[in-house]
Image: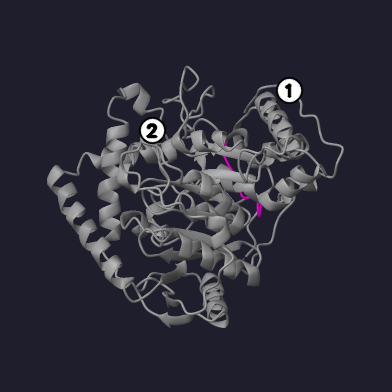
Amino acid sequence: MRFAQETVVDTNKNNSLADLSVDALTKGFASGQFSPVEATQACLSRIERFNDEVNAFCLVDVEGALKSAKDSEKRWQRNEPLSAIDGVPTTSKDTTSVKGWISTAGSAVFDMKQPASEDSSFVSRLKEAGVVLLGLTTSPEIGWKGVTDSPRHGITRNPWNTSTTPGGSSGGAVVAAALGMGCLHIGTDAGGSIRIPAAFTGVFGHKPSFGRVPNYPPSAFSTLSHAGPIARTVKDAAHMMNVLSLPDSRDWYTLPYNHEDYAAGCLGGVKGLKIAYSPNLGGKHVDEDVALRIREAASIFESLGATVEEKDLDVSKSDEIIKAFWHSSVAWRLRNLNEEQLQMLDPGLLQVFIEAKETSLLDYQNEAQNRIELGARANAFHQEYDLLITPTLPIPAFTAGLNVPENSRYQSWVDWAEFCYPFNLTRQPACSIPCGFTNSGLPVGLQIVGRQFDDMSVLRAAAAFERVLPATLLTNPVKTKTLKE
């Protein structure tokens, strides 16, 4: 990991500043109780203390973060903050572009030789809002899989059990969120890469409707790709959505700006909503511990005044559709590599590239038509139901460094991510919110899916659920050498 300076000056105030929400931080900034500099120092201290154990960051810009924090401090002293998240410690992902930083995309092949010359859309909006950018969080190579390890940066570890994976591809971001190494975090999601790691690590992650958050430069994963917030609480993520959803003409897929205040919208409840509860999304395997937590979550929504009915959305053929789109995206991303460079890739990524050669243009177009039919079924489903709840994942976190659990029914990460990627295909908003733990002490995530473009209902439902079952927060990694049986 590259630091802009060698040491972090720890704050004299309690390190709990690293655990505060957006509202608590900005209230303290406004009153002068503490400053953005002190909050930033607290987060930097957490990074310095824990990053060697969990590998959440591949770049930390101490000097730049403290400069941004001092600028924010002056704005708060003048009572002129740029936004409701001015001065809040924030991170971006190693697959994103931050002007002046070198993003590696977790790769020894695609390593940038020069710092980025422009910011990604969402980074631009965050900078305009006055956040303090701490650094880049780790990702698998080009964000290609649902766990986080790479040839470039090694294995990232789950703070709830450091022998397990945090999931991916936004694995570094969720670990940073779980341990208070920053308050707000950018994730990207083309097949579950926000929701998968959020579920494995007990934090909140929201994949917005496609186009709701401008996403430039464009991802190799094209119309599958979304960018969104990862945080410890729903309201923190909603504050971030207010900024991320601001327009950027560079992304021609972007939706018209809707002026929603997602943070204010979180105050509502779910009374009167009609919610479909799908325990296994049409017969998919779900571990018993996970299934129990999801049933309990459905009961919570009933207790909050929603009508909950057990009902499946037909997502058949999603696995074949995602493979066609995924394979073609990987093939395009790797198209210019020579044989020597190909051999330097993550072996699993290289295998996808080899398999992609077997996908014809006719195959791709056939799956594109199937995707249209899937989207139409989802739209029809949500004519009757406001929301759909499912497990985020059918299993808890497994051994770090593997793509699938040992001796399992799964052949690839796509097999166990089967609750997530259908909603990349349909372009619907979907989040993962913590809903308890397995008997072995690993987090379980509940997925809440909304009708297309209705991010507000997803966030409002998540916030209502969170008020009943708040997330359990960590302050230290759990050092566990072997998985509990």
Q: Is residue 155 magenta?
A: yes
The dot on residue 387 is none
Residue 189 image position (x, y, % from top left): 43, 48
Q: Is residue 19 left or right of residue 104?
A: right
Residue at the disc numbered 1: 6
**Which image quadrant is residue 351 in?**
top left
Task: Give the tally of numbered discs.
Answer: 2
**Residue at the image point whose x is 35% and y is 38% from the top:** 251
* Pair 2/1: label in front: 2
The dot on residue 217 is 2
Q: What's drawn in magenta, residue-wise?
A: 154-161
Q: Secondary structure at mark 1?
A: loop
User: Would you say the residues marked 2 and 1 are in contact, meaning their CB atoms lie under 8 Å apart?
Assistant: no
Q: Is residue 218 above or below residue 394?
A: above
Q: Is residue 136 left or right of residue 213?
A: right
- In this view, the residue in front, 358 or 376, is 376
- In this view, the residue in front, 31 or 111, is 31
Q: Is residue 206 magenta?
A: no
Q: Secondary structure at mark 2?
A: loop
Q: Is residue 212 above or below residue 483?
A: above
Residue 15 image position (x, y, % from top left): 80, 44
